Amino acid sequence: MSTALPKAVQEAIDKIEIAELQSRYMYAIDWYDAQVYVDTFTEDGELVFPEGYAKGHDQIREMITRVGQFFGKLADASAPTKPAHLRHFVTNQVIRIDGDKAHAVAYWFDLNNDNQPRWPYLAGYGYYEDDLVRTPQGWRFSRRNVINEISSTSPPENPCW
């Protein structure tokens, strides 16, 4: 007797797992947790972002560590009151599943409060284009393209097929 789930049920589960992966990625950025961040990628995963490119866990770890050091210094720079926080959000996920592979697009934005008296402001926004694969550890990014629409030009066409 087969224990396979109906296709629609499995696809719904996959989409929830991918949305959770996208959220774990955001928490890892905000808490400067290099290990959790790296674990969202496959061993040979690629990260494409406006400031550069990283391939594989070692390069991705090095990149997120530098980002954490940079933003950590900013957060502590004016600390007569509570420390500043940078918080990232992901929205409008559209996910297409194809067996053990998936493609997703999603908007992202981040709020920062590195000012006095710690009022939040929109610090950045854009979207992600993700290629994902199912691994024994769950869904992972095989390639994540970060488009920052503040620092780069939007594409001429809708990225959501």
Image (cartoon, rainbow, N blue to C red):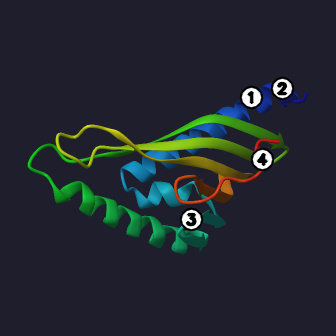
Question: In the rendered image, which quarter is residue 111 located in?
Answer: top left
Residue type at tag 4: Ala
Q: Position of residue 9 (x, y in %)?
A: 79, 25
Residue type at tag 1: Ala
Q: Nearer the viewer, residue 155 or 54?
A: 155
Label 2: how many Cα within 10 Å (few below 14, some 14–19, many 20+): few
Q: Position of residue 136 (x, y in %)?
A: 69, 51
Cα distance in 3D space between marks 4 and 1: 13 Å
- Give me the disc on residue 125: none
Q: Which of the two discs, 4 and 1, labels the residue nearer the N terminus?
A: 1
Cα distance in 3D space between marks 4 and 2: 15 Å
Q: Secondary structure at mark 1?
A: helix
The residue furthest right is 1
- Of circles 2 and 3, which is in front? 3
- Give me the disc on residue 8: 2
Residue 62 visible? The answer is yes
Residue at (17%, 40%) from the top-left corner?
A: 117
From the image, tell me which residue sits under label 1.
12
Cα distance in 3D space between marks 1 and 2: 6 Å
Marks 2 and 1: in contact by CB < 8 Å?
A: yes
Quarter holding the C terminus? top right
Residue 136 visible? The answer is no
From the image, tell me which residue sits under label 3.
50
Q: Secondary structure at mark 2?
A: helix
Marks 3 and 1: in contact by CB < 8 Å?
A: no
Residue at (85%, 44%) from the top-left corner?
A: 99
Q: Secondary structure at mark 4?
A: strand
Q: Secondary structure at mark 3?
A: loop
- Of circles 4 and 2, which is in front? 4
Cα distance in 3D space between marks 1 and 3: 32 Å
- Of circles 1 and 3, which is in front? 3
Q: Which of the two discs, 4 and 2, labels the residue nearer the N terminus?
A: 2
